[in-house]
Image (spheres, rainbow, N blue to C red):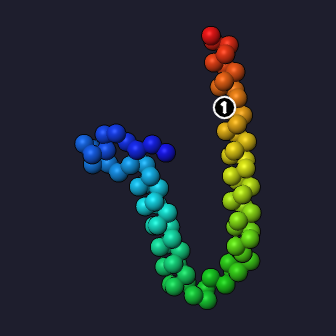
Amino acid sequence: MKRYSSSKDTGAPCQRCMILRVFLGMVLFVVILGLAGGNELSYLKHITTQKVANTIMIIGFIIFIFKIIFWYWDKKRENVSE
């Protein structure tokens, strides 16, 4: 990740700061939802940490494969134009 070089001039936070803010906001949202929901969230009991971890791994692998394909396609296109 790259920090914005002009972020001090515009007052905009860097990309790393934005990612951390979104992550912390989501954690806070989950905590508030858990405290406020209580027993009404019993229908979510089938969602386990293992299922969430597997989903994250599968999505990450799919994104990785697409990035490799697009990287290879871009390299191939650069070689043709030279």
- Asked if residue 28 lies left or right of residue 57, the reply is left
Please, is residue 9 above or below residue 43 in the view? above
> How many numbered markers are drawn?
1
Q: Position of residue 27 (x, y in %)?
A: 51, 71
Q: Tell me the quarter of the picture where residue 71 sits.
A: top right
The outermost residue toward the top is: 82
Q: Nearer the viewer, residue 14 or 40?
A: 14
Task: Indicate the quadrant containing the C terminus: top left, top right, bottom left or bottom right.
Answer: top right
Q: Tell me the quarter of the picture where residue 5 sits.
A: top left
The outermost residue toward the bottom is: 39
Q: Position of residue 44 (x, y in %)?
A: 68, 78
Please, is residue 72 above or below residue 27 in the view? above
Q: Position of residue 43 (x, y in %)?
A: 69, 80
- Asked if residue 74 lies left or right of residue 16, the reply is right
Q: Position of residue 77 (x, y in %)?
A: 66, 19
What amino acid does circle 1 point to? Trp
Q: Label 1: few (<14), some or many (≥20) within 10 Å?
A: few
* Residue at image point 43% right, 49% down: 15
Please, is residue 4 above or below residue 18 in the view? above
The outermost residue toward the left is: 9
Q: Nearer the viewer, residue 31 or 38?
A: 31
Residue linked to disc 1? 71
* Residue at image point 67% right, 16% down: 79
* Residue at image point 68% right, 13% down: 80
Numbered disc 1: secondary structure: helix
